[in-house]
Every structure is written in C-alpha cells, then in structure tokens.
Image (cartoon, rainbow, N blue to C red):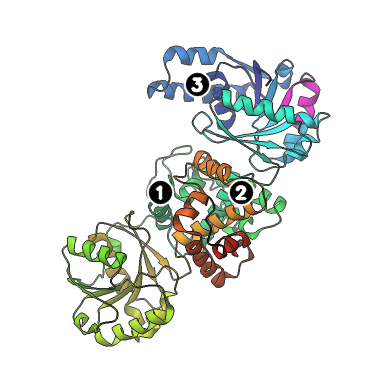
Amino acid sequence: MAREFTRVGVVGLGTMGAGIVEVFARNGVEVVAVEISEGALERGRANLTGSTDRAVARGKLAEADRDALIGRVTFAVGLGALDSVDLVIEAVPERLDLKQRLFAELDRVCKPEAILATNTSSLSVTEIAVATTRPDQVIGIHFFNPAPVMKLVEVVRTVVTSAEVVADVEALCVRLGKVDVTITDRAGFIANALLFGYLNQAIGMYESRYATREDIDAAMKLGCGLPMGPLALLDLIGLDTAYEILDTMYRRGGRDRRHSPVPLLRQMVTAGLLGRKSGRGFYTYERPGSGRLVPDESTPVASAPLEGARTVATVGVVGSGTLAAGLVESFTTAGYQVTQVDPATELASLAEADLVIEAVADEPEVKKALFAGLGEVCKPGAVLATTTSTLPVIELAMATGRPAEVVGLHFANPATPLVEIVQTILTSAETTATARAVVAALGRTGVVCGDSAGFIVNALLFPYLNDAVRMLEAHYSTTDDIDAAMKLGCGYPAGPFELLDSIGPDRSLAVLRAVYRQSREPGLAPAPLLEQLVTAARSFRG
C-alpha cells in the first residue's frame, strides 16, 4: 500500500517552487515552504498569494478555498524546519554543486524515512542522490511550469531508487491530480530532450537570418498548431535557463550537436537579454516580467511586404489533384480569373497569366521539364511558383531561364492558413513582394524563408519527430508516454507518434532524408527504426 504523505517540504520559492507549494496545498497536504532569507521568503509568499489571488479573480478558486490553501502553508527560513516532513522537494537554481550541497544538508536534517526529491529539469538525479547517505530514497519529481496548471509530472528513478519510493511517488501524483510518466535518469528526460533540440534549431534559423523571428514563430503556431512559437517560448522560459538546460544536455547526453547551444544564445545571455524576466530577449517587453510586447527596431512595418508588388489578375494552376483543386477554389474565391491545365497538356493557354502555380507530384525531372516549358510560354514578368515541399526551388528556377521570377509557395497544410514563401538567392524583391500580396489576398498568412530543405515548418518539425523515434528506439520510454509528455508537458495538440502516424512514416522519412541530405548533420540522419517501419509498411501504433 502506498505511503500517505501528510506533510511535505518545498525548498526554493521562486515561480516554480511557489507553484509546487500551491499544488500540494490545493490537494489538502500540509506544506513547509522554505527559503534562505527573510527577503526571499517574502518574495515566495508573494508568488503564492499572487497566483492564488489571480485564480480567485478568474473564478478558478473560491475565496474560502484560497484561504484554506494558504492556511496549510507554513513559511520558514532555513532547512531546520523540515525535520518532520515525509517528503521534501527542491526547486532551487539548476546548478549541480548547489543541489548536491542542499541534498547533503537535507540528508542530515530530515528524518531517516523521508523521501528527498529534486525538481531538476536536466541535471543528473543520480549525481544529486550520491551526495546523501540514502540514495535509494532520492527521486526526481519534475513538475512543469505553471505547476498548478500543467498536468504532467516526470518521475525520474535512478539505478538505486527503491521500487517502493517510485510507487509512493506515483500514487502521490495521482492524488495531486497529475499524470505521471516514470522514466530513468537521462539528460533532459522526455519533454526537455525533445523540446530543446527544436528550440535550439529555431535559434540557429534566426541567427542565420534565414527567416525573421515573427515568421519563424508564426510558421510553427499556424503550421503545427503550437500554443507559442519557439522564440517567444524561449523568452518565456528564460534564455539563461534555456542555455543551462541545453549545455547540460549536450555534456550529459552524448554531445549531440542538436543540444549544443547556438552561439547567439550564449551572446544574448551574456548581454543580459534573458527574455521576459529582463524585459528583452528575442522580443522587447513593456517591462521586466511582463508578457506585453512593444515594438522595437526589428518589428516589421505592416505595409512593407506589399511594396513593389506586381498586379496579379489572372492565375494559372497546373495540376489535377486535390491540391490543385484546392488552389483553384481559393484563387477563384479571392476574385482571380483562374485557368487550370493538366501538366500533360499544352501550356500555351497560360501565356497571359500573371501568376502560374504548379501542383504536381514532387518528381524532380518532371518538375524541371514543366518549369522549362513555363519559362518558354509565360509572358515576361509573370511569377512562376512551385508548391514543392522537398525539392530545391533554385533547381526549378534555373530550368526556366528566368530565375528571378520563380518563388516557392508551400501550402503547409490545407487545414491551416499558413503559406511558406520560399525565395532563392536569385528571386527578385518584386517577385517576393508579389507572392506576399497574393497570399494576403487569399486570406492566408505568408512567412518568408530561404530555399533550404524543409523550409521553416518541416525543417523544425521533422527533426523533433526523429528525436522521438530515437528515444523509442533506445527503449527509454513508450509511444504513449512520449506522446503524453509532449501534450501535457508542452501543450502540443498531438504527440510525436500521433503526428508520425497521421503524416505517414514514409512521408516523414522522405522529408528527413531531404533535410539530412542537405545538412549532413549526424543528428538529423533518419532513425533506423523509422526506416525499418517504412520497409515493413508499418505504422508506430499499427
């Protein structure tokens, strides 16, 4: 039978620690909330009262329940107040030396049967545990921010954590109304190991000026249904926190370059640009701690993308499949005069079109031949667009003999308003502006990027999915727990394996091969398990 925890301790009352205190107190558990000084204690008390007062104001918590919750919390300075707790969980800064010293002292202060837990998001629970004389009673209990809201808890067992301790903590998570996934002690656990590789890659995309911060964030929100774009999320997490997590995962996780912090991240941390907490990160905020954005020198002017755009009245659509039919409907609804032709028929009927967009299968030689034909028959100044999702746009552009007038228009998903506008090194500014104006006229959101495999969405999405396959391949966790971790811990609308099965492993493999072929980055090589499933014509849950 699971142990009954009646009194717990929480050390460190920042945003995370105060949230953990609230979680326990909301569920009827007496809490001893500890800080190192009176000043820090008062700030922690303010964090808790501020959170609960906001919950009352939003109708999420009754005033009487708020008062009862606060009444269950005893605030204290110093670890001596923890001598009678059944469980203590720390939420101090992510520094191994600090946590080791803290656990050595907790080992001395707490009663022999007390469980000692760490809320670390990336450090080795094992290395923390060995600082005590009771490593079998040390465990990771990783809550997600904001702790009162987020349902996921990662329960991290070491090679010496006792089975009884694991079972007791799992039962406690159920009592707290949380969903737990139990895993072993590996850098980043599940959620951070998958999330931060993606975030780091997004920073690199911005650092190289491949796309603007706004377009990167809009692409991932609209293209994948994520609650926040990666750069805005980094500002919320804190760039210093993100750097520490990435650096720890890189050093502890086999030195995978996907977790090696991008130089820009280190530079921003050094300069004190930490995100919302400092008032400026990738974006600028009204004040430190605020989530309200204010314009800065990097904020684009709304009218700028349409300047220099050519007039488009007639549109040609090449293709006969579902995408082509959807394009015809979209352009017709927007008021354009549309001519649809089959790629096998004479293209001469498109001679006077202002814009021609192809929607045929991604077969390189077929598309090159098509664009060569369009280059011959279309009038000078006509914009020639490809909907390719995997081929280099520049190769199609060169086949036309007029590459300045060629652009990619990748309709990322028919169910979303996103269109990736892909400009090559030879695409003219007028062509890009025309494409943006047309996309806006369709009532869609256009994001501009360079001509690199995967563009924005697929270049960020599929390596993340590949990382999840590698995690499964290593038998670190199950498809269900990995999916749950990303949905409940990060607010994703679908887990990676749900997405992979929805997209199709064969399609996913094709995109990953294109991304890897261009970069040759070992961390982006398709996972062998994915290749095996495609060969066997199986899905992850099939």
Total numbered badges shown on the rendered structure: 3
Frontmost of labels 1 and 3 is: 1
Residue at the spot of label 2 = 193
Determine which of the numbered discs, if any, sits on residue 225 in the image: 1
Q: Which element type, helix, strand or loop, lies under badge 3?
A: helix
Residue at (43%, 24%) from the top-left corner?
55
Towards the viewer: 436 or 515:
515
Residue 126: image quadrant is: top right
Residue at the spot of label 3 = 49
**Residue 302: x, y in percent?**
29, 56
The verdict on residue 538 being magenta is: no
Is residue 462 at least partly visible in the picture? yes
**Residue 412: x, y in percent?**
38, 60
**Residue 109: x, y in percent?**
78, 21
For the residue marked with disc 2, what is the amino acid? Ala
Is residue 282 at least partly visible in the picture? no
Determine which of the numbered discs, if any, sits on residue 130 in the image: none
The span from disc 1 to disc 3 (Cα, nearest Å) is 33 Å
The mark nearer the N terminus, 2 or 3, is 3
Frontmost of labels 2 and 3 is: 2
Residue 388: image quadrant is: bottom left
Which residues are drawn in magenta? 102-116
Q: Which element type, helix, strand or loop, lies under badge 1?
A: loop
Towards the viewer: 456 or 151:
151
For the residue marked with disc 1, what is the amino acid? Gly
Which quarter of the rendering shows the N terminus? top right
Residue at (48%, 37%) from the top-left corner?
289
Lateral position of residue 119 relative to residue 234, left or right: right
The verdict on residue 110 being magenta is: yes
Do callouts 1 and 3 mark residues in contact (Cβ within 8 Å)? Answer: no
Towards the viewer: 243 or 230:
230
| Farthest-out residue, right | 133
